[in-house]
Image (spheres, rainbow, N blue to C red):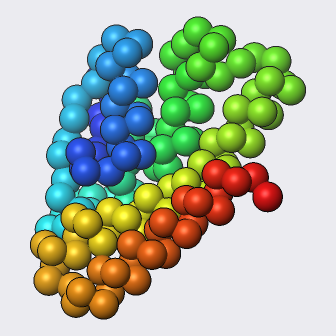
Amino acid sequence: MVLQLYLDWLSEPCRAVAILLLENNIEHQVHELGVIKGETHSDAYKQINPVGKVPAIVDDDFNLSESHTIMRYLCVSRNLPDHYYPNDIKQRARVDSWLDWHHTNLRQGAVRLIKANIYGPIKNLSQVTIDESRKEGDNILKSSLTFR
């Protein structure tokens, strides 16, 4: 069975998984879901990912979510080149450390900027909420990149 990828193209973590699949010619079928439309909260999708988030994959009878976990799984299960996810435990730990840092730092700032600049106008958020989200996102990104 072909690997199934559930994603929303507006999501950077979804695009990261899709790029890994495409760059390595891994056969897959894309199922587009609209996060803004609430399509990740359907009963059918919650059978795939009970948390109702994207991305998620189904590989035969195995469901998996969280972009970094999916990418780690694909690297190992598809025996991708070592430069993606090294076999050496210390090098792999470094990759894991940066992946985790990304989610707890850069991603958090970026999410606030996306909320302000994309979702704000779509969902008619107040200008005060938009401005606060922009300021929070900017501050998180600046502090994340100082390494202090």
Residue at x 70%, y 32% (from the top left corner) = 95
Residue at x 34%, y 38% (from the top left corner) = 15
Image height of 80 relative to 57, above or below:
above
Image height of 95 relative to 7, above or below:
above
Residue at the right extreme, as displayed: 90
Which quadrant of the rendered structure holds the N terminus? top left
x then y, percent, for residue 44: 23, 60
Front-most of residues 88 and 107 = 107
Residue at x 59%, y 32% (from the top left corner) = 72
Front-most of residues 26 and 44 = 26
Front-most of residues 2 and 68 = 68
Image height of 124 relative to 106, above or below:
below
Residue at x 50%, y 50% (from the top left corner) = 66
x then y, percent, for residue 36: 19, 67
x then y, percent, for residue 50: 41, 64
Q: Hey, which quadrant is residue 60 in on the image?
A: top left
Image height of 45 relative to 115, above or below:
above
